[in-house]
Amino acid sequence: MPHRDPSGPAVPAGSYRDPAGPAVIVDPYSSGALFAPAFRDAGVPVVAVTSGPRPPGVYASSYLPADFDEIVAFDGDLAPVIARLREIRPRCVIAGCESGVELADAIAPEVVPEVANTPERAAARRHKGAMAAAAAAAGLPVIAQICTADPAEMEAWIEASGLAGRDLVVKPPKSVCTDGVIRLPGGRGRRKAFDALAGRTNRLGLVNDRVVVQEYVKGVEYVVDTFSHDGVHTVTDVCRYRKIDNGPYMAVYDSMEWLPPDEPVLDELLPYALGVLDAVGVRHGPAHIEIMRTARGPRLIEIGARPHGGGHPAFCQVATGDSQVARTVRQYTGQGPPPRGYELLSPMLVVFHIAQRPGVVRNAAALDAIDGLPTHHFSVRHFADGRYIEMTKDLFSSFDLGFAVFTHPDRDLLWADYRAVRRIEAGLVAGAPAPAPPP
């Protein structure tokens, strides 16, 4: 029978964790692909656990099977996966990306219970309805919302909440990268939007069994990235997102900027973010908390019990000299606890390419000028003459086009290069200048 440690999760009698064992990464895709080389550089073997026979299509290009000493495939039966991991006695079980969070949460308490997140709150670390409910139960203010499979229940909630005639947002409870997120001005068309999401398979291959319907709130969006050990939360970086409405699509990524640790807004954001971590039972490993700072204060958008995606930790290493991946490796190779905060060594800005209308690309070579901009650090582009491009609608379609990363001590130069990217994009049929950036 399990015994219970009052400071952490239920612990089976007898641990299968060996501090000298391999690291296990569940769905080592997106930024999760960065763990294997980092652990290998520290002399640690790495085992992959995959939640399906192949990665979701949106993550396929980031999967590098050759990086792993062993790959354990989950086929729906958890028992053989747990049995094999108990044999190899891993030092940790880490979710590499969002598709691996639920499986990692199912495995860790059975294999490495002393470095597992709270099992009883696992749903709140993946399901948007459950995470908001957990935050509210902990006394944190949240966006008014309902998660339901019944459109009649949605209608009754809208009336009871005084949201009739107000802007609403509908989204799937387990999507990622703004997949399926729709803004409804005045709440119009909500039944059609509800029906379009309910029962649909999202970009991770999951069926939307329910729909989240929430009040539309305005503000500035931030992300707080963290690494936790034994319930102690440390902050690796804080970034400010800039998103725009692109035709009918809301929250299209425009840019992301690292903030210095003395930015005044952090005094409000960080206590809220750390409260969310406690509310959903994060005690170990990386997490990614997206927060809207509204006129009424911070409000949770969502939390992921995994590293910031899109290769962010590699860029964070340049910006701050540290990252969620680096802290994970140091923690599980006995190098001592990480710092509670971070430094901003080199201001950094990510600019996401945007197609503001569909069309056929022309003059793709003009984008090569981005590499010569004064603050350019890295870029990836997927443009080719003659390629038809859809209007950008979510983060997945942003990554389909690419992005550029700029870093320099002078913030004004970073934003000058942002404006240069938008001017260059204007030479493509598929692109058009985005709104001017903030000062």
Image (cartoon, helix red, strand yellow):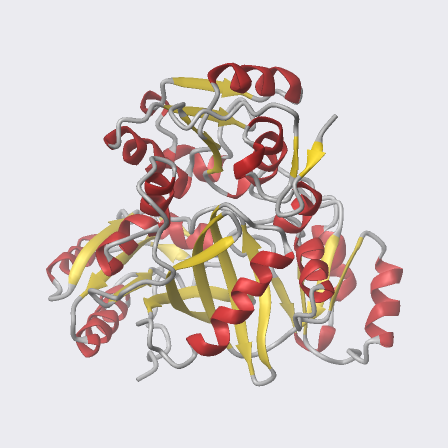
Residue 308 seen from this side? yes
Q: Quadrant of the N terminus?
A: top right
Relative to 382, does residue 61 appear above or below in the rendering? above
* Residue 406 drawn at (x, y percent): 21, 62
Residue at point 37%, 49% (across, down): 337
Res. 266 image quadrant: bottom left
The answer to whether residue 303 is left or right of residue 149 is: left
Relative to 56, does residue 374 appear above or below in the rendering? below
Q: How many marks?
A: 0
The answer to whether residue 16 is left or right of residue 392 is: right
Q: In which quarter of the image is the C terminus?
A: bottom left
Residue at point 62%, 48% (across, down): 7
Residue at point 51%, 63% (across, down): 290
Res. 356 image quadrant: bottom left
Relative to 245, does residue 354 appear above or below in the rendering? above
* Residue 366 drawn at (x, y percent): 18, 58
* Residue 308 drawn at (x, y percent): 42, 51
Q: Which of 413 and 276 is in front in this view?
A: 276
Relative to 282, does residue 60 appear above or below in the rendering? above
The answer to whether residue 255 is left or right of residue 231 is: left
Q: Nearer the viewer, residue 389 or 35?
A: 35
Q: Nearer the viewer, residue 307 or 137?
A: 137
Residue 390 seen from this side? no
* Residue 107 drawn at (x, y percent): 59, 30
The answer to whether residue 260 is left or right of residue 80 is: left
